[in-house]
Structure formats: C-alpha cells, structure tokens
Image (tube, rainbow, N blue to C red):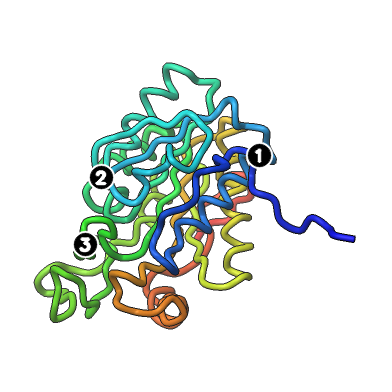
Amino acid sequence: MEALVYEKPKCLKKDGAFTFCPGCGHGVVLRIIAELIDEYKLQENTIAISSVGCSIFLEKFFDLDVAGASHGRSPCVATGIKRSLPDKFIFTYQGDGDAATIGFNETIHTACRGEKITTICINNTTFGMTGGQASATTLVGQVTKTTPKGRKAELTGYPLHAAEIVANCDGAAYVARVAICSPKHIREAKKAIRKAFEMQIKGLGYSFVEVLAACPTNWGLSPVESMNLIKDNIEKVHHIGVFKDITSGEEK
C-alpha cells in the first residue's frame, strides 16, 4: 500500500516547473514559502512582488497575484500595495544584488518606516541572472565576473552585512540570516521564514530574512562544492542567526 510522502503545495502552479540552474537554492526557498502560504491559508490573500533577477519568474511558478518591480524597487511597490490594501499579505522575493546592492536604500527606508511587509533576500554573493558580477555581499578575495582577481577591500570595500544593518532600524520587527546548505539548515530556514510571516500576520512591523544560497553556475562549482563553500567560507563572513525579534527580545 502506497503512502503519500510528498505533495506539491497548492499555491504552486501544477505546470509551473522551476527553471533554475542545477544546484541553485531558489527552488528550495520558493518551496518553503509555498508550504507556509498553504499552511496559513494565504493563497487568496497574497500578493508577491518580484524584481529584476532570478525572482523575475515568480508568476510562472506561483498561483498567486504577482506584481513586478524595477531592479531594487520591490519594497517601494510592496509599500504602495500594502498601504492601499492593508488586509493583503505582501512579500518581496529578492536577490542580494537587488535588495542589498542596487536597492539597499529602499530596503533600509522600508525597515525604518516599519512597513508591515516581509522581504526574503536570497544572498548568493553575486548578481546571478546578469552573469555573476560582484554584489555588495561578495566576499573579499571572491572571484566574480567583475572581480576576476578576487574582490579587493582597498578597491571596493568589505562585504555588506544586510541583516545586521536592517536589524538596527527601529521599524524592523524580525530579522534573521539562514542558509539552505543542509537538511538542518533548511529546517532552520523554514522556521525563520515562518516567524517572518507571523510578524506580518500580527501587524508587528517589517520582517527581513536573508538566505545564504548557492549559485553553482556563476561560482564555477558543482552543487556539492557550492554547499560546502557556504558552510566553510560564506557562513564565516555572513553569520547565521536571529538579529532581531521584538516578540522575544532575542537580538545580536
């Protein structure tokens, strides 16, 4: 007798197969988001905001209302929609090149205003879709298309730590950084995204979850090597943890 052990979330389109590169972390995170939308019965009440980058295809995967934004401007679009339709559940899905580089100004001011929306930022330390250029979160010494000899701090500075900065904004209710490089990490990532969703559901303020994820294509590594890179290198620079949680007083 067969037992059901896996079922596609209802808010994902039946014919909307993910089109990401092998080993990319986006599919894992989108699956987590979809599971939580189903669990909280938010499908009919959710508007997702996509931006330029790998998140641009959200409407192909989700059976949800999706609004597009210019590069880095998802928090602005999300703010307008949330203020116009305050009963809607609004989340932005962005990359580090989007939320922590080109659009970091928008991210910070959204957090300072305490907009009651949720941002999921996928940090793979590069501009993924546009070819693997360096972003604000790129590690010192990391080779990218625009740092072929490795990022040099004296030329382009040190990595920007988005979660820590957002946590210092008074309007931020929950801020965390997680990773998806092992089953344990994935469980912790879902726990953090769940908490971020609950902050919005309760109307407590802005929530921001940064997810360390692999980009094997632009890193020039296999999927397994990419997972090891996150654990052995990236986590040592972009530390995992909860940086702000106004419901528990847990801050770093």
Residue 235: x %, y % from top left: 43, 74
Q: Earlier in the sequence, mark 2 or mark 3?
A: 2
Residue at point 57%, 25% (across, down):
45
Q: Nearer the viewer, mark 1 or mark 2?
A: 1
Q: What is the spatial separation of the Cα atoms under label 1 and label 3, in whole angstroms?
A: 34 Å
Query: In terms of secondary structure, where does tag 3 sit?
Result: loop
Q: In this image, 129 relative to 18: left or right?
A: left
What amino acid is at disc 3?
Gly
Residue neighbourhood size for the residue with mark 2, other residues' Cα within 10 Å, grouped as few (<14), some (14–19), many (≥20) = many
Q: In this image, 41 relative to 75: left or right?
A: right
Residue 64: x %, y % from top left: 51, 32
Q: What is the spatial separation of the Cα atoms under label 2 and label 3, in whole angstroms?
A: 18 Å
Q: Quadrant of residue 250?
A: bottom right
Residue at point 47%, 37% (across, down):
91
Whether 122 is drawn above or below 15: the answer is below
Query: In terms of secondary structure, where does tag 2 sit?
Result: loop
